[in-house]
Image (cartoon, rainbow, N blue to C red):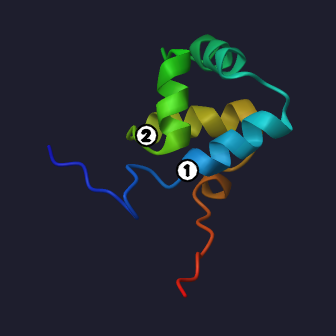
Amino acid sequence: MKIYSYEGKRNVCGEKIREMRVKNRMSQSDLAAKLQVNGVIMERDSISRIESGTRFVADYELYIFAQVFGVEVKSLLEVQNKTKD
């Protein structure tokens, strides 16, 4: 299966996930533990790759990220427009 990229990244939610994790004062390991409690087996290095945009995020993973942060899925998908000069 071909995985496409957006602006050189494999996901659009990584920056928002990092933002929410920091806002909630969680380390990547803390977040991994919360995901695992909710049924998604994910290690700290996978979260690092998601946040840097080098790992694809499955829809069910995105749903659990939203549950952990107490937000709607669509809030993790908000893409900020970057203007090119």
Residue 78 is tagged as none
Q: Nearer the viewer, residue 58 or 2?
A: 2
Query: From the viewer's perspective, is residue 21 above or below residue 76?
Result: above
Q: Quadrant of residue 24?
A: top right
* Residue 4 pos. (x, y %): 26, 55
- The residue under the point 37% across, 58% down is 8
Query: From the viewer's perspective, is residue 37 above or below residue 12?
Result: above
- Amino acid type, label 2: Val
Q: Is 7 left, or right, of 44 in this rendering?
A: left
Reading the image, the residue beneath label 1 is 13
Q: Measure the C-alpha gap from mark 1 to mark 2.
A: 8 Å
Label 2: which secondary element: loop
The image shows a total of numbered marks equal to 2
Reading the image, the residue beneath label 2 is 57
Quadrant position of the C terminus in the picture: bottom right
Q: Earlier in the sequence, mark 1 or mark 2?
A: 1
**Tags 1 and 2 touching, CB below 8 Å:** yes
Q: Nearer the viewer, residue 20 or 62?
A: 20
